[in-house]
Image (cartoon, rainbow, N blue to C red):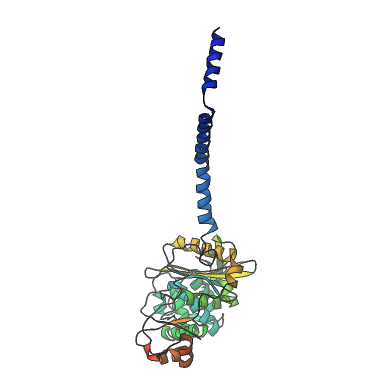
């Protein structure tokens, strides 16, 4: 009897319930379950799209990755086309990236087996050094490894003094080479990159200079190695490259690190994948490690979007930033172009109206 009464009570209760209310309750429960379990999926999808897929720019292309360097340029090494940039024309201290130009000028003005004499001034250089001694005589190719691997300021000055006769004369050769390459917003006062008034470059100019240096087979071979053993004063010396990008990025081929308190952490990097060659310049990055990660991000972006970026219309042109007190005729004479071409290229109505800081597009 108890069993039958219980069953009757249950059945009567079920019959008295309104089907509509039951369905509504079940539907609400299902919705809450879907929201609870679906929210993490939606959040993950949003993070994936934002971080890994990248943000699209106004052209619908993947925008460059965020990097912490104050200025950078990503360049196609084969064509010289800029694929991405931030503050490319901003004049900044280039630190030891200066030594890329030092090496290029040295290789173009001396033979590798030429002897470099180390002066007492070079031996007293501070900052990062190779440890050369006054009076030493070393073949150029050996001390070149010390300059590019260990970023030796002493080695850079010894090379400059031996090949140029003096630091000032060698700096003149560096600036002449910069003009020929189209690095119009660079001014080199020394061969090592320690802070000095009037010594500056830009991310764009350093990309141009690095591209030219990497086209020199000897330079490319040196900066692409991680270590080298040399016979130095009858002793074998192992020189290790401090450029960690070479070992941290697949396809890395070079090139040079830099740091001073004024310039911050800098890096010129190059890499090759599938026959494509890229160069990345980072100036004033926030830390030593950041420059490796930032260079890798830029390289990945360039390789992954290479065809689209190379096919896009040029975004940068050669420019010259007017200095205080300069006239259009001064600039034309310095750059080896005509005043008429500067007027035409920049649609200038009054040639005397240029002002310090103005960007002039070059023919």
> Is residue 155 visible in this depiction of the protein?
no
The answer to whether 146 appears left or right of 120 in the picture is right
Residue 113 percent coordinates (x, y): 56, 80
Note whether 90 is above or below 328 in the view shown: above
In depth, the one of 312 and 253 nearer the eye is: 312
Q: Quadrant of the N terminus?
A: top right
Residue 158 percent coordinates (x, y): 45, 79
Residue 211 percent coordinates (x, y): 55, 76
The answer to whether 335 appears left or right of 211 in the picture is left
Residue 290 percent coordinates (x, y): 46, 61
Note whether 337 is above or below 239 in the view shown: below
In depth, the one of 350 and 93 nearer the eye is: 350
> Is residue 23 visible in this depiction of the protein?
yes
Residue at left 51%, top 51%? Answer: 46
Q: Quadrant of residue 287?
A: bottom left
In depth, the one of 238 and 284 nearer the eye is: 284
């Amino acid at each position: 009897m108890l069993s039958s009464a219980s069953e009757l009570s249950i059945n009567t209760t079920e019959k008295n319930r309104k089907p509509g209310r039951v369905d509504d309750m079940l539907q609400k429960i299902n919705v809450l379950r879907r929201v609870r379990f679906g929210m993490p999926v939606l959040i993950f999808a949003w993070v994936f799209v934002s971080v890994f897929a990248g943000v699209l720019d106004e052209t619908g292309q993947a925008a460059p990755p965020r990097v912490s360097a104050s200025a950078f340029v990503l360049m196609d090494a084969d064509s010289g086309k800029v694929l991405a940039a931030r503050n490319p024309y901003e004049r900044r201290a280039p630190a030891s990236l200066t030594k890329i130009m030092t090496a290029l000028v040295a290789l173009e003005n001396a033979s590798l087996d030429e002897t470099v004499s180390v002066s007492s001034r070079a031996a007293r250089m501070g900052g990062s050094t190779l440890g050369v001694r006054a009076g030493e005589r070393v073949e150029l190719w050996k001390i070149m490894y010390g300059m590019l691997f260990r970023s030796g300021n002493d080695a850079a000055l010894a090379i400059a003094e031996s090949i140029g006769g003096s630091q000032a004369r060698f700096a003149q050769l560096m600036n002449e080479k910069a003009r020929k390459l189209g690095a119009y917003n660079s001014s080199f006062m020394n061969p090592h990159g320690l802070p000095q008034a009037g010594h500056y470059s830009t991310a764009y100019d350093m990309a141009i200079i690095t591209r030219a240096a990497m086209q020199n087979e000897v330079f490319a071979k040196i900066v692409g190695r991680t270590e080298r053993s040399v016979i130095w004063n009858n002793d074998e010396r192992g020189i290790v490259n401090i450029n960690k990008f070479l070992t941290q990025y697949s396809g890395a081929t070079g090139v040079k690190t830099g740091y001073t308190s004024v310039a911050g952490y800098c890096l010129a990097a190059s890499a090759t994948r599938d026959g494509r060659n890229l160069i990345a310049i980072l100036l004033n990055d926030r830390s030593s490690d950041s420059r490796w990660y930032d260079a890798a991000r830029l390289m990945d972006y360039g390789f992954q979007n290479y065809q689209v970026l190379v096919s896009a219309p040029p975004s940068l042109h050669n420019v010259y930033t007017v200095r205080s007190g300069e006239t259009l005729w001064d600039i034309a004479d310095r750059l080896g172009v005509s005043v008429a071409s500067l007027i035409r290229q920049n649609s200038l109505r009054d040639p005397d109206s240029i002002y310090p800081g103005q960007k002039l597009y070059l023919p």
